[in-house]
Image: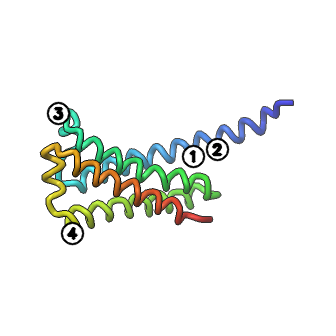
């Protein structure tokens, strides 16, 4: 027999968690694009695939630990703390890679060099996977 009350309770929790995750996703995308020295939105509109790949990697790299946090946490505040930490780690990874490890990376992405975009996107996804794996309740 279908338990309507249990469904409503679960659906409400789902909607709240999903809305919070989307809000953190949008906030991360906005902040990440402020940190990068180039304007991904403009570059992507111009057909710059390297910018799309690098931004896509950063977004996936953020969503992986976000998904892990959703499945591991028991409260919205705990989820928020993990989401903020995941965003900070992803942004620090970009700063370290673009300013210390590979100084010409930003210019190469602006120039549309796919190797640079794939490199940064891959690092972002790798950092996100490690971040997600380290999140335990």
Q: Secondary structure at mark 1?
A: helix
Residue 7 versus residue 113: which sits nearer the camera? 113
Which residue is disc 4 drawn over? 100
Mark 3 and mark 4 lie on one chain; the one further toward the N terminus is 3
The residues tagged by marks 2 and 4 sit, at their Cα atoms, a distance apart of: 42 Å
Mark 1 and mark 3 lie on one chain; the one further toward the N terminus is 1
> In the figure, 102 relative to 116: above or below?
below
The residues tagged by marks 1 and 4 sit, at their Cα atoms, a distance apart of: 36 Å
Which residue is disc 2 drawn over? 13
Q: Secondary structure at mark 2?
A: helix
Look at 27% across and 41% down and name the residue there.
52
Q: Secondary structure at mark 4?
A: helix
The residues tagged by marks 1 and 2 sit, at their Cα atoms, a distance apart of: 6 Å
The residues tagged by marks 3 and 2 sit, at their Cα atoms, a distance apart of: 40 Å
The answer to which quarter of the image holds residue 135 is bottom right
Mark 3 and mark 2 lie on one chain; the one further toward the N terminus is 2
Judged by depth in the image, the label closer to the viewer, 1 or 3, is 3
In the rendered image, the quadrant that contains the C terminus is bottom right
Which residue is disc 1 drawn over? 17
Q: Residue furthest bottom?
A: 100
Which residue is disc 3 drawn over? 46
Residue 100, image x and y in percent? Answer: 21, 69
């Amino acid at each position: 027999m279908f338990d309507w009350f249990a469904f409503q309770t679960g659906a409400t929790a789902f909607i709240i968690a999903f809305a919070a995750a989307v809000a953190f996703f949008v906030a991360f995308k906005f902040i990440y694009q402020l940190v990068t020295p180039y304007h991904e939105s403009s570059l992507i509109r111009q057909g710059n695939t390297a910018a799309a790949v690098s931004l896509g990697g950063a977004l996936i790299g953020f969503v992986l630990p976000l998904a892990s946090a959703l499945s591991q946490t028991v409260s919205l505040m705990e989820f928020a703390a993990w989401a903020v930490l995941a965003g900070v780690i992803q942004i620090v990874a970009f700063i370290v890679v673009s300013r210390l490890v590979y100084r010409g990376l930003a210019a190469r992405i602006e120039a549309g060099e796919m190797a640079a975009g794939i490199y940064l996107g891959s690092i972002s996804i790798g950092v996100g996977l490690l971040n997600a794996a380290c999140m335990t309740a």
